[in-house]
Image (tube, grey):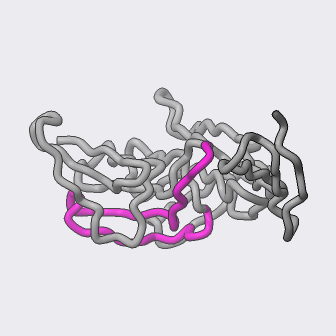
């Protein structure tokens, strides 16, 4: 039995090595999944970080972290609502209440909800434990396999700029008339032979 998270399709579970899949996250208000982790000490405890973590031209954002303690039958929203994009969730190998979340934050602008967050109480409360600035988020976090007292994190200065000025090409004639999106009227032009 294992789980898969999808950019726009929620969380799925298989009990037969991937032959068939069942959606187990459909009742939640968000379907974009950036990270998923199952507790090493209990396969029934799953944490999901929402909001895709891949920077591309069209991204789906999330609303924080969710947790299931019954093998994905029910989910509880744990907060970190404004992180929007979570790259990784890391669960302590011996204590499923200790969790680190790598939050990329808002792709389209600065945000204080970036960095690495930690809970020691299973998600009831969160503490920001690594923060560079409003333009740098965390995309990955992991426990050292030999010593869980050591945690590694990867920071990423990720920003998807908006398009302040764009162009539209007319399709009714050869390339002759262009309209800047910020302007309210088209420039006159002549068709070029």
Task: Magenta stretch: give its range.
Answer: 56-83
Residue 87, relative to residue 67: is it above or below?
Answer: above
Residue 106 % position (x, y)? 68, 59
- Viewport quadrant of the N terminus: top left
Q: Quadrant of residue 125?
A: bottom right
Say whether residue 72 is visible.
yes
x 43%, y 49%: residue: 7
x 76%, y 43%: residue: 157
x 87%, y 47%: residue: 190
- Viewport quadrant of the C terminus: top right
Left or right of 61: which side holds 172? right
Left or right of 168: which side holds 69? left
Left or right of 114: which side holds 124? left
Specify whether residue 122 is painted magenta: no
Residue 104 % position (x, y)? 64, 51
Residue 180 % position (x, y)? 84, 57
Left or right of 147: which side holds 129? right
Specify whether residue 82 is painted magenta: yes
């Amino acid at each position: 039995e294992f789980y898969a998270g999808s950019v726009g399709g929620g969380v799925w579970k298989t009990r037969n090595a991937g032959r068939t899949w069942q959606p187990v996250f459909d009742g939640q208000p968000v379907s974009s999944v950036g990270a998923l982790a199952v507790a090493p000490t209990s396969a029934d405890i799953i944490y999901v970080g929402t909001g895709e973590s891949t920077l591309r031209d069209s991204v789906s954002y999330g609303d924080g972290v969710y947790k299931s303690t019954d093998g994905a039958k029910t989910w509880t929203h744990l907060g970190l609502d404004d992180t929007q994009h979570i790259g990784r969730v890391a669960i302590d190998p011996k204590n499923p209440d200790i969790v680190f979340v790598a939050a990329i934050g808002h792709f389209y602008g600065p945000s204080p909800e970036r960095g690495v967050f930690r809970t020691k109480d299973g998600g009831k409360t969160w503490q920001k434990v690594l923060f560079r600035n409003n333009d740098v988020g965390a995309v990955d976090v992991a426990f050292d396999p030999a010593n869980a007292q050591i945690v590694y994190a990867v920071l990423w200065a990720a920003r998807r700029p908006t398009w302040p000025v764009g162009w539209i090409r007319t399709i009714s004639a050869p390339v002759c008339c262009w309209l800047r999106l910020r302007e309210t009227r088209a420039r006159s032009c002549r068709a070029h032979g």
